Image (cartoon, rainbow, N blue to C red):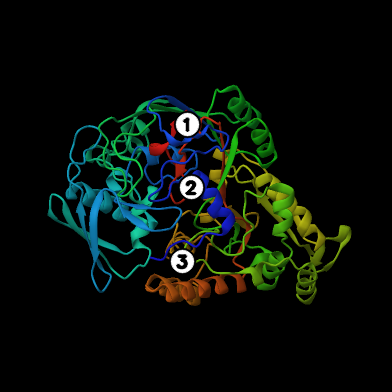
Amino acid sequence: MTTIRLPQLLAAALAVTTLTWGLTACSASSAAPAAARDTAVYGGTLTFYDPVEYTAWQSTNSLWSNSNVTPSVADRLIWQDPATGAFHPWLAQSWSISPDHLSYTFHLRPGITFSNGDPLTAQVIKDNFDQHAFGNAKLGIAPDSFWEGYVSTTVINKLTFVVKIAKPNAGFLQILSNYRASSILDEPYLKLNLGGQSLLQNWVGTGPFVVEKVVGTTEVILKRRDDYNWAPEGYPHQGKAYLQTIIFKVVPEESTRVGALESGAAQIVRNVAPYDEATIKAEGGTVVGIPVQGETNSLKIQLNAKAPTQDLQVRLALQAATNRQEINKVALSPSYPVPSSALVEGTPDRGNASSYLAYNLPRAEALLNADGWKAGPGGIRVKDGKQLHFDIWVSPYYQVSLAVLQVLQSEWLKAGISLTIHSASLTQYEALEGGQATHPSPDWSFDQGQTSTADPNVLRVSTSFHGYNAYNFVTPDTTLESLLNAQATAFTPAARKAAVQAIENRLFSQAYEIPLYDETQVFGLASKVHGFSTESTARSWFYNTWLS
């Protein structure tokens, strides 16, 4: 794997917010006294406010609120350094890869136990991987698309096992480091049905914190595990975590979350709105924006919909009519990188799609004119008696979704494209989204979203007809499928980068998606918070966090 080549701005942010190998704990606030920055303190309770309710806690659930809790409860075989992309031993002490890239031999660190005292063994790892890959119909557990191509895990002895995959996959190590694809949980959890696995209080992990209390969908309390002593190899801090307790609370009101930092009711708040970033800084707090490695936040064209987006020229026109710099300026902030690729800034081996994503209103108008869409009443284009109109639903997963879509609405109107924005509750939205994916509808032309994984293979998992099929292909795009498979067998840095660029060229020459912004987690931190860090896809990991 190659290291992540971070732009200077991101590198500077990560130097403050994310621990890198060989460095001492860094303060998340430059306002803290020098002595406090240099000397970590054990103990204390940190309160973390989140705007989104917690839902089913199955380990593959990637809901933002859930996934800022669970990485501190369950560990993985491998740790991926978010600042460099390098892989480090964690639960696995070492590993080797066969010359054909089809067999991975792992040796577990001795002495690791789950929070209930059970030892971590190769058999437990096998049972986790088998359930991820194959699911369990009797328990209602579905297979995980990240594990496509998995063949088997063979136990050699208590601490050694061999994982076999059907075809080479350059992103396989990253899968084993991913919080939602490879968190290791004990046998009692694996034996539960979907309902049981969806309860956080049933999680039995090897992590530095354990679940003390769950209050409905609005509060979680984690307490420190004092015998924890297997942090990732080379990590600046070993042994137990610094914090004694972490309290997670759901607080939907933005003003309440921001006010809590000033009053001391909360020490970290997630999903800071762009318009509140300056307020937090003015009150002595710190704003931390961490791009989420993986896919950009984009509108995925739904190719099974009976809509004008079936037409390539219309899709290309929508792409050209989208001004991402204006979206950033009006609806977002400098915390959010402007997208120039299908992958977020900092993701290893991302391509460059700048030429496809440039704002060009004259080109959009020319494409539509040539395709027979002529100006009609109110400036909205018309073809065969039908307006060039789309409906779109605000995604409740992303706080900035409404503001971004409102800017997009005004931009597309300049090209004669009508966009109506609808809002729905999380439950209503999930029902709509799931229903449309199964039953094509003229109303569901776009699906806003992204998948977070710090490796280009995320494009194969997300967009392949045989994977998540994010574009809802009715039949496979054989050219795209070939390119997605080719990147998985590119093991040299130059070959991988070229293969990923070829994928991006295909995605954007066909205008299968419309990037809106680089998905970014924006946290507000009180000045007393130090050592706050995230894993590679910007999910909080509180092992090294402490309070002065």
Q: Earlier in the sequence, mark 3 or mark 2?
A: 3
- Name the residue furthest right: 377
Q: Residue 143, can we see it?
A: no
Residue matched to label 3 = 465
How far apart in space, not on screen, are marks 1 and 2 (Cα)? 25 Å
> Relative to 536, does residue 2 appear above or below in the rendering?
below
Can I make out residue 71 in this image? yes
Q: Position of residue 208 (x, y in %)?
A: 32, 36
Q: What amino acid type is highlighted by mark number 1?
A: Ala
Q: Mark 1 points at which residue?
A: 36
Structural distance between the alpha carbons of marks 1 and 3: 52 Å
Badge 2 marks a residue whose secondary structure is loop
| Residue density around tag 3, few if under 14, some if 14–19, many if 20 or more, within 10 Å | many
Q: Quadrant of residue 415?
A: bottom right
In front here: 319 or 536? 536
Label 3 – label 2 distance at C-alpha: 27 Å
Label 1 or label 2, whichever lies nearer to me, is 1
| Kind of residue sitting beneath label 3 | Phe
Q: Where is residue 363 in the image (x, y as percent from the top left)?
A: 77, 72
- Report which residue position mark 2 lands on: 538
The amino acid sitting under disc 2 is Ala
Q: Is 80 situated above or below 354?
A: above
Dot 3: what SS?
loop
**For the residues carrying marks 1 and 3, which lies nearer the camera in this image?**
1
